[in-house]
Image (cartoon, rainbow, N blue to C red):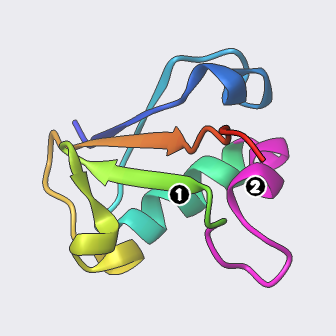
Amino acid sequence: MGVKVIIPTPLRQFAGKRESVDLEANTVAEALGSLTSQFGELKKHLYSDDGRLRSFVNVYVNDEDIRYLQKEKTTLQQGDTISIVPSIAGGTE
């Protein structure tokens, strides 16, 4: 048993239509790296050309935003759940 990565509905088409993927990883960076190596199409939706996580992609470990933890260096424990949550743009001009 490793960690579970929850794939958001809009990105499932780039992840073999899977709702989640179980991976072995010690950090969020390892987990996302493993995920994007399995599903290459997903990489461009999560990372910018310079290799940074896109600003509109929010990542949570067990409901905690990694921006308030150690970002992609956040360590993982067996059984942790990573949720990828794309920001929804909206509002009025």
> Residue 73 shows which numbered tag?
none
Q: In the rendered picture of this protein, how many numbered marks are placed on residues? A: 2
Three-letter code for the amino acid on which mark 2 is drawn? Lys
For residue 22, above or below residue 13: below
For residue 2, above or below residue 9: below
Residue located at (78% from left, 71% from top): 48
Q: Nearer the viewer, residue 33 or 12?
A: 12
Three-letter code for the amino acid on which mark 1 is drawn? Leu
* 56 left or right of 43 in image: left
Pointer 1: what residue? Answer: 32
| Marks 2 and 1, the one that precedes in the sequence | 1
Residue located at (23% from left, 72% from top): 68
* Residue 58 highlighted magenta (yes or no): no
Pointer 2: what residue? Answer: 43
- What span is in magenta? 39-53
Q: Nearer the viewer, residue 53 or 4?
A: 53
Name the image quarter holding the N terminus: top left
Sort mark 2 into few (<14), some (14-19) or many (20+) by Cα contacts within 10 Å: some
| Label 2 – label 1 distance at C-alpha | 9 Å
What SS does tag 1 mark?
helix
- Image quadrant assignment for residue 88: top right
* Residue 47 highlighted magenta (yes or no): yes
- Image quadrant assignment for residue 9: top right
Residue located at (61% from left, 69% from top): 53
What SS does tag 2 mark?
helix
Q: Nearer the viewer, residue 36 or 83?
A: 83
* 89 left or right of 74 in image: right
